[in-house]
C-alpha cells in the first residue's frame, strides 16, 4: 500500500473516533437512571463533548503547525484514550461531564489533524475523492453508532459504551507515529484573541439555545446570546486587523463554500438532534430497549453514508476541468498546507495557496 493510502487510512480511523458521540447517545437514558438525573441534564453529556471539540479546532491546527502532525495526532490519540477511560469509570455525574469535556478537546485534535492529512494525501485532481472517503468515517459512525451503543448498553451498561472504544484511539496513536513523517512545521504565531473569541461565541450561543426550553430562563438566554453576539463582533474585527488571523475571512466571500458549510452544518444539526432526543424519547418515553432504539434511529444517517462518496467523485472531474479552463474563475476554498502532511486547519491562511472543493462537495 502506498504512503498516500496509509495516510488516508490513518485519517479515516482518526475521523472514525467521532463515532463516540453516536454511541454515547444510546447510553444517555442508562446514565440518567444510574445517577438519578433529569432528562434536561443529559444534553450536557453530548453537548459538553461537542462544544469542547468545536472550541479546540483552531488551536489544534496551529499546534500541528508548530509541533508537526505526527506529534499532535499521536498526542490526540493518547488523550482520547485516557479521557474515554476516565468517562467510563467516572463515579459521579459531574466527573463524567468533566471527562466528556476533556474527551471533546482530544476529539477536536483528532478531527482537525486527520482532515488536514486527508486533504494533503493525494494530488489536487484526486483530492475531492479522498476527502469524501474521509467523510464517510463520520457518516458510518452516525449510522452504526446508535446500534453499537444500544448493544453495548444492553450488554454491560453505559460504562461499557465508553470502555469498548479504547482500542481505536490507541491504534490511531500508534499509526500516527509510524505512518507520518517526523519534523515540525513552520513556526507561526497564535492568534489567541481570535481563538478565544471564536470559542466564547460557540460556548455562549450553544448554552443560550440549550436554556430556551427551561422555564424562567429568559434572562439567562438573553445574556448568553448577547455575549455570543459581542464575541462575533470582536472576532471579526480581530481577524480583519491582524496579520496572522486564526481564520482567513476571505473564504466567506466564496458563495460555494458558504452554501456547502451551511448545508453540512444543517445536516449534522438535524442528525444529532434527531438521534439525541430520539434515543431519550424511545427509551424513557416509550420503554423501548436500547438495541431496538438504535435500529429505529438508523434511517437518517444511512442517507449520508450512501451519498458522500458520489459527491466527491463528481467534484474531481469538475475540478480538473475548471483548472484547465483559461477563463474560469477559481471558486474553491483556500487550503493551508505549505508542506504535505501539515495539520493546519483548512480555513487558515497559507503562504502558498492551493485549492480544494468546499467540504468535498460541489
Image (tube, rainbow, N blue to C red):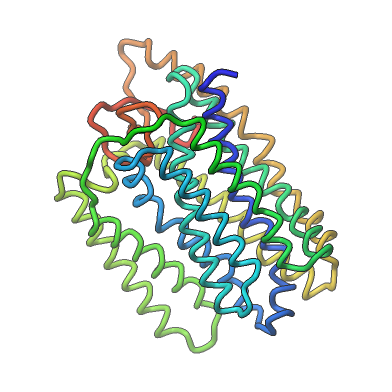
- Near-viewer residue (295 or 266): 295
- Near-viewer residue (337 or 268): 337
Residue 202 appearing in the image: yes
- Image position of 73 with respect to 165: above or below: above
Extreme bottom residue here?
A: 216
- Image position of 108 with respect to 188: above or below: below
Decide if residue 10 is on the left or right side of residue 298.
left
- Please state the horizontal and vertical placement of residue 35, each as a whole percent of the image: 68, 82
- Please state the horizontal and vertical placement of residue 2, each as a whole percent of the image: 55, 18
Image quadrant in which you'd find residue 44: bottom right
- Image position of 116 with respect to 328: above or below: below
Residue 347 appearing in the image: no
Residue appearing at x 62%, y 40% in the figure: 137
Residue appearing at x 71%, y 64% in the figure: 278
- Please state the horizontal and vertical placement of residue 290, each as a whole percent of the image: 81, 64
Residue appearing at x 65%, y 70% in the figure: 89
- Please state the horizontal and vertical placement of residue 325, each as a whole percent of the image: 36, 11
Residue appearing at x 69%, y 35% in the figure: 306
- Image position of 258 with respect to 315: above or below: below
Amino acid at each position: 500500500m502506498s504512503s498516500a493510502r496509509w495516510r488516508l487510512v490513518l485519517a479515516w480511523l482518526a475521523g472514525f473516533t467521532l463515532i463516540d458521540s453516536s454511541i454515547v447517545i444510546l447510553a444517555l437514558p442508562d446514565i440518567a437512571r444510574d445517577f438519578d438525573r433529569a432528562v434536561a441534564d443529559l444534553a450536557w453529556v453530548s453537548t459538553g463533548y461537542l462544544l469542547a471539540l468545536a472550541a479546540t479546532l483552531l488551536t489544534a491546527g496551529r499546534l500541528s503547525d508548530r509541533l508537526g502532525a505526527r506529534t499532535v495526532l499521536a498526542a490526540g490519540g493518547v488523550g482520547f484514550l485516557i479521557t474515554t477511560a476516565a468517562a467510563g469509570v467516572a463515579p459521579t455525574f459531574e466527573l463524567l461531564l468533566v471527562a466528556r469535556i476533556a474527551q471533546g478537546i482530544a476529539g477536536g485534535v483528532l478531527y482537525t489533524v486527520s482532515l488536514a492529512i486527508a486533504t494533503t494525501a493525494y494530488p489536487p485532481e484526486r483530492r475531492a475523492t479522498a476527502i469524501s472517503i474521509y467523510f464517510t468515517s463520520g457518516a458510518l459512525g452516525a449510522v452504526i453508532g446508535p446500534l453499537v451503543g444500544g448493544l453495548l448498553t444492553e450488554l454491560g451498561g453505559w460504562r461499557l459504551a465508553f470502555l469498548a472504544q479504547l482500542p481505536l484511539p490507541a491504534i490511531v496513536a500508534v499509526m500516527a507515529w509510524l505512518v507520518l513523517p517526523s519534523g515540525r512545521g513552520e513556526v507561526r504565531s497564535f492568534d489567541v484573541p481570535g481563538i478565544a473569541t471564536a470559542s466564547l461565541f460557540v460556548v455562549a450561543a450553544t448554552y443560550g439555545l440549550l436554556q430556551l426550553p427551561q422555564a424562567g430562563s429568559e434572562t439567562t438566554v438573553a445574556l448568553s446570546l448577547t455575549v455570543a453576539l459581542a464575541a462575533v463582533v470582536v472576532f471579526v474585527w480581530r481577524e480583519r486587523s491582524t496579520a496572522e488571523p486564526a481564520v482567513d475571512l476571505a473564504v466567506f466571500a466564496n458563495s460555494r463554500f458558504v452554501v456547502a458549510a451551511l448545508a453540512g452544518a444543517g445536516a449534522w444539526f438535524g442528525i444529532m438532534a434527531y438521534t439525541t432526543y430520539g434515543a431519550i424519547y424511545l427509551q424513557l418515553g416509550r420503554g423501548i430497549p436500547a438495541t431496538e432504539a438504535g435500529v429505529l434511529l438508523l434511517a437518517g444517517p444511512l442517507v449520508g453514508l450512501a451519498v458522500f462518496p458520489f459527491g466527491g467523485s463528481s467534484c474531481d472531474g469538475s475540478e480538473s476541468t475548471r483548472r484547465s479552463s483559461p477563463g474560469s474563475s477559481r471558486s474553491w476554498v483556500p487550503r493551508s498546507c505549505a508542506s504535505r502532511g501539515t495539520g493546519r486547519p483548512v480555513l487558515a491562511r497559507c503562504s502558498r495557496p492551493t485549492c480544494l472543493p468546499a467540504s468535498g462537495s460541489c
